[in-house]
Image: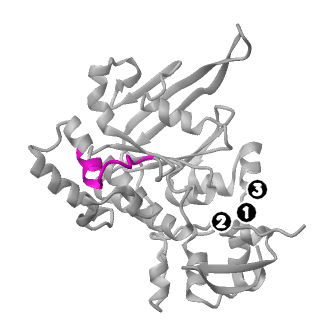
Amino acid sequence: MSVLFITHDLALVGDIADRVVVMRHGEIKEQGPVERIFSAPQHPYTQALLACRPRLDRRPRRLPVIDDFLGGNPPVLKEDPPRPPAGRALLEVEGLAKSFRVRTGLFRHESIDAVRGVSFRLARGRTLGVVGESGSGKTTVGLTLMRLHEATAGRVLFEGVDLLSLDEAALKPYRRRIQIVFQNPYASLNPRFTVGQILLEPMRVHRIGGDSGERLLMAADLLGRVGLDPSALDRYPHEFSGGQRQRIAIARCLTMKPDVLICDESVSALDVSVQAQVLNLLKSLQEEFGLAYLFISHDLAVVKYISDEVLVMSEGRVVETADAETIYRTPREEYTRKLLASIPRGLTRAATPDA
């Protein structure tokens, strides 16, 4: 059987394909055997696609993007310097658990344990990556932290206050300080609202800004910070690409001036060039605002690039926790080693012939 495999996952292409066709704007830019395309790409666009993807063997301060290569001057990548030690924990999670009751028959129900005794700490200005297979409980952890699911057990301490014990009125100020960016930028924005309405609504609800004029100026400023023109305020979500919509979703979170941002597979639906732009944006915003990220993803290369510490989950439990370099170089647990072994190595193989 012949296979035409269409994807933006370049590492997977490097692992399974015999020949590669590289397309842009409806045109073929380059094609040939996978070994030649990956080891000696000729077209600047192909070179850019291969360089945009985070690699396991290095961690640049900033990922290159398409425009860096199409301008004729490929960038010189600078390594990300070591981070200073983490400060006091902003968010402490202790023994978090979540069960769901599901119907298994006409009169029977069964309890499914989605999260089982998860504990971790997250400091201001730091990123905790959460990885694991589908169904491991990653997303449920994020939603339970925000009380979009009600926890079965455990504590979530935000600056020492247990969010799980608060009533709705007492919780409201904390809802503003913990925000989430969802995976699908095509479904997370109200299609009937303009971008301006999308950004202004949460500010009105939480009474941020003195009046509508001040809020409008704040919204325009936030669009500029995420790389969009303020003229976007009068346009609708369908007028933007996936990457631009994800930037709007990030700007919407920033209207709340949050301390913690949960990124739930927030770059998984994006192609590698747009993914690099969003990852660069997240790192810049973290440096500017001191944001703490809980970065949930199944993409281990992306998690290694952006995270200070990595938490590995399986069947609702924490299997292993360590700093990003340690997890990837010397994992302790067999499950972590199997997870790392499953990463497609096409790009690494091409970039380092002896690998």
Q: Is residue 317 among what the camera can see?
A: yes
Quadrant housing the N terminus: bottom right
Residue 90: x and y in percent read: 36, 38
Q: Residue furthest front?
A: 192
Q: How far apart are the two marked residues, 3 and 1, measured between alpha carbons?
A: 8 Å
Dot 1 and dot 2 residues touching (CB under 8 Å)? yes
The image's mark for residue 9 is 2
The residue that mark 1 highlights is 344
| Magenta extent | 188-200
Disc nearest the viewer among 1 and 2? 2
Dot 3 and dot 2 residues touching (CB under 8 Å)? no
Q: Is 159 colored magenta in this rendering?
A: no
Mark 2 residue element: loop
The image's mark for residue 341 is 3
Dot 3 and dot 1 residues touching (CB under 8 Å)? no
Q: In front here: 77 or 11?
A: 11
Residue 144: x and y in percent read: 48, 29
Disc nearest the viewer among 3 and 1? 1
Classify residue 193 as left or right of residue 64.
left
Q: In front here: 211 or 259?
A: 211
